[in-house]
Amino acid sequence: SAVVFPKKIATEQQSLMLVKRLLAVAVSCITYLRGIFPESAYGTRYMDDVCVKILREDKNCPGSTQLVKWMLGCYDALQKKYLRQIVLAVYTQTEDPQTVTECYHFKFKYTHNGPLLDFGSKDKKSDSTITCADTKKASILLIRKIYILMQNLSPLPNDVCLTMKLLYYDEVTPPDYQPPGFKEAKDEGLLFKEEPMYLNVGEVPTPFHLLKLKITTEKQRMENVDKSILKQRETAEPLQVCGVSRDDPEEESQDMNEDPVLDNEVEDKNHVNISEA
């Protein structure tokens, strides 16, 4: 069956539905192409002419069922306009979920009309000029980029685990808010043992939302990736902490040397409300 693009995105509800679908497609494609769950955990859909895999609850695969439940928690926070960022992280040692080997950052912005899903470009359009055709084109481009990138990255280790953290817009989010399936995070930092590389994958704007996707992985996995596919950033620091900044530095400066989400400093936890799965 098809993942249908709405003929128009005239209401916040239509925009929200599209952003939810796009998030589901992106997370499904990433986990499928990185070999995290078995084939049985996915169904097949078509997004225009692009064949995509969609994660589903599978009684033989508790992990996929768990991730579907996490996604429902994300939708709750997105609908309430609390959600600022989803960090989907891959780790290898079950006793040490803070030390990660790959991270996917989904950032959300809400326009004065509604929410915005941003996948990483610097071209800021005013929300009045965003058409349904723009959104559709950006969505398909994003999924194609995910496919190309995932197929070119070196494989993950055999046995990996997933964790998810949610970050909020603190000024509007109740301090005790936790979406279904999440609890207050004890430790907000995620550590990279190997040297990481950051990639801006892209962004999708609607009149109400902006979604941005960034990926962080070990630099050695990038050896086969055509450098022209994505703009990349390198860091000289072999040890990085995936901390959290309250304000997106991109708003102020186009020449940041570090990704605002990956920093050597872990922010004072008193100021940031973070959930973990």
Image (cartoon, rainbow, N blue to C red):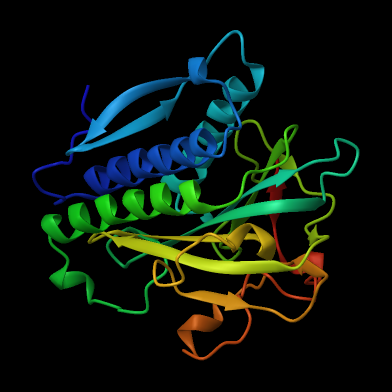
Q: Is residue 100 left or right of residue 74?
A: right
- Residue farthest to the top, as pictured: 59
Occupied quadrant, residue 271: bottom right
Q: Nearer the viewer, residue 125 or 231?
A: 231
- In the rendered image, the vertical position of residue 259 relative to residue 229, given as above or below: below
Q: Nearer the viewer, residue 96 or 79?
A: 96
Picture coordinates of residue 156 (x, y %)? 67, 43
- In the rendered image, the vertical position of residue 271 relative to residue 150, given as above or below: below
Q: Nearer the viewer, residue 175 or 249?
A: 249
- In the rendered image, the vertical position of residue 214 relative to residue 15, given as above or below: below
Picture coordinates of residue 152 (x, y %)? 49, 52
Q: Is residue 197 left or right of residue 191?
A: left
Which quarter of the rendered picture does the N terminus lie within? top left
Occupied quadrant, residue 50: top left
Which quarter of the rendered picture does the C terminus lie within? top right
Q: Nearer the viewer, residue 228 or 264?
A: 228
Q: Residue at x 30, y 79 (%)?
A: 123
